[in-house]
Amino acid sequence: MNVLEATDIVQVFRDGETATTVLRGVSASVTAGELVALVGPSGSGKSTFLSIAGTLLTPTAGSLRIAGRAALGLHERAVSEMRNRHLGFVFQFHHLLEDFTAFENVVMPIHGARVRVDAAWRARAQALLARVGLTDRMSYRASKLSGGQKQRVAVARALIMKPELVLADEPTGNLDRASSDHVMELLRELSREEGTAFLISTHDASIAQGCDRILAMQDGQLLDPNPADSSVSASVAVRSPHV
Amino acid sequence: MVFEIKLAVRYLAASRLQTGLLVAGVAVGVLVFTFIAALMNGLGVRLTDDITGSVAHVTLEPESRTPRSFMAPGRGRALFAVQPGNDEVAVIRTYRAALQVARRMPGVRVVVPEVLGNATLARGAKALAIVVTGVQAEQADAIAPLGRSMIHGRLDLGVGDVLVGASLADDLAVAVGDRLILRAARARVGPGADVVVTVRGVFRLGIQAVDQRVIYLEIGAARKLFDLASGVSKLELKIDDVWQARALSDRLGRATGLKASSWLDGNARLQEGLRAQASTGAMIKAFSLLTIAIGVASTLFLSVMRRRSEIGILRSFGIGRAAIVRAFVLQGALIGALGSLAGIALGFGFAHALLALSTRATGTPAIPIDPAQGEYFRAIVLAMIASGLAAVLPAWSAANTDPLQAIQS
């Protein structure tokens, strides 16, 4: 089952008279439990595509289905509900609420579902925090955690609602090598354990190589994954780690 | 709602200094509000008490009659007429019925029958025109507070006794125990026209016209002086709520058929003054609330700016606009609640301290502040509403945060 189906996505940004086309008919899909890397040079449209896939940005044209449901043209409340129930986000910057504890940050999306944080939810949050190795940091304020710990809290938060798809935009971009590897290993394991698909935008070739599939973008288009001319595929900008 | 409360409390607690300053700002605004209320209301009460304390709240009198005249038939020439003022003294002859009606009227505290008339008070060669007020001895203190205004002698109206105003006593150079000659202005000439009276007390009400021209006499003696077989000149009333005087006066006028007037009729300027004072107070209070609102709004706007990325991330995982609005409006309301509680405590304490510091040796305060009239409950409610409303704009701005822009920034 496809948890993400994007068809002919076009995104044009207008600034007065100037129009910039960022995505030129991108079509992509992600199946349940799949770990997909989205690679490409800066400005290729990766983040824009991820924002559209996360319903944070409405495309100029195209269609989008999340977990089998049409995701465009919905009322704002329905979009919020879709994000809450079916999607998780991990950003380059963790975006934790600094004044809340690690545990409180993880349960935050549950409030968005307008349900009570009962014992079952608390147990899940604790299990996720334990899974990302933060059992002893649950009651720490986010502001007291290290960068790697914060990003692991963000991963647990992205998974709390058992989403079908987690969109990760450069999730290890601010981390050192060891923390980066740790986080990626976690994503791979959690993908298997939770059955959650991950679409990970990255510049890091080693991260991309560790995924089930790679989508390469250039100039607002997805490159053919099986090109007749193999040199085209080879030219996709998957940079060396941390260059 | 639990989440919104938690978010609001956590955001406020996170910026303790900012929240503390904001609460202090609201507290000062509420302090100004309650202080002005206590001062203006206290001043209003004192002015009203000063005036209504010494006069009747409602007066019932006989209708003034048109002087009699006899006209020649046809040509309209007056054959005989009595000029105004020369007619017989207006008297309520059957006053007991009106007295009962007035006493039974709800809101009436006391009804005092009085006999009034002009007379001359003489000592030796000096004679002064005065006004005689004849009252029952036990009601001498019922309208004007003669008891606490006595500066010499005592409040005792036996037959042949008089109470005189301090200025009048000075003018005639009389003291308690001195004897004076009293003569009604319309007395018949001849033996028995002069009445010898003894000064039993000297009072100072603080109203020059009364202190200089009025004497009090026992009502029976007054009737005899003015040659009235029965009846009274007027009924004077004290009522529970002085601001109901006009309505009560109208009802009493209809019920008794007498001419009824209230203390308000003769004190239009006081009413204007009190209204102007209330308007000024209301404006100052409104400005203090406006200051609170501006302070809360500006600080919350800064908070929204600072937390834009957090709000964006909350929105990204499905926290709705309404929840964000509620969280920020709650912050405003909480600041309003904390600030107003601190403000009324400060206001109450400040008003009491000022009252204590300004109280003279006589026991009366130089500053007419009344701490009980600080409108504390109203201050709390209005400050919370002002703070809550002031938070709406920042809250709306927060709710409209574009999650993508906020996250990318």
Image (cartoon, helix red, strand yellow):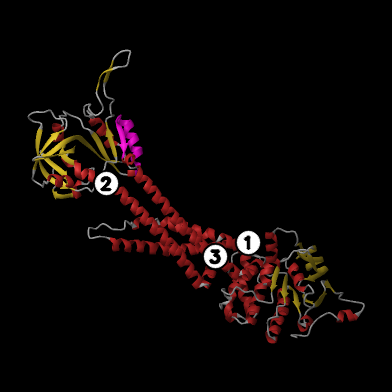
* Quarter of the rendering containing residue B181: top left
Disc 3 chain ID: B
- Is the residue under label 2 in contact with that under label 3 (CB below 8 Å)? no
Question: Distance from label 3 to label 2 (Cα)?
Answer: 49 Å
For disc 2, the marked residue is: B53
- Is the residue under label 3 in contact with that under label 1 (CB below 8 Å)? no
Q: Residue at x 71, y 68 (%)?
A: A87
Q: Which amino acid does label 3 sit on?
A: Ser
For the stretch drawn in magenta, the main secondary structure is helix
| Number of other residues with Cα within 10 Å of mark 1, as a class: few under 14, some 14 to 19, many 20 or more | many
Q: Residue at x 27, y 46 (%)?
A: B53
Up/down of B231 relative to A28, above or below: above
Query: Is A82 or B143 nearer to us in this picture?
Result: B143
Up/down of B403 relative to A143, above or below: above
Mark 2 lies on a secondary structure that is loop
Query: Is A68 or B386 nearer to us in this picture?
Result: B386
Mark 3 lies on a secondary structure that is helix
Where the C terminus of chain B falls, by quadrant?
bottom right
Query: Is B306 or B175 nearer to us in this picture?
Result: B175
User: Same chain, marks 1 and 3?
Assistant: yes
Comes first in the chain, label 1 or label 2: 2
Q: Does the magenta stretch include residue B246?
A: yes
Magenta highlight range:
B243-262
Answer yes or no: is residue A114 visible: no
Give percent across and percent down for residue A63: 80, 63
Q: Which amino acid does label 2 sit on?
A: Gly
Comes first in the chain, label 3 or label 2: 2
Answer yes or no: is residue A218 visible: yes
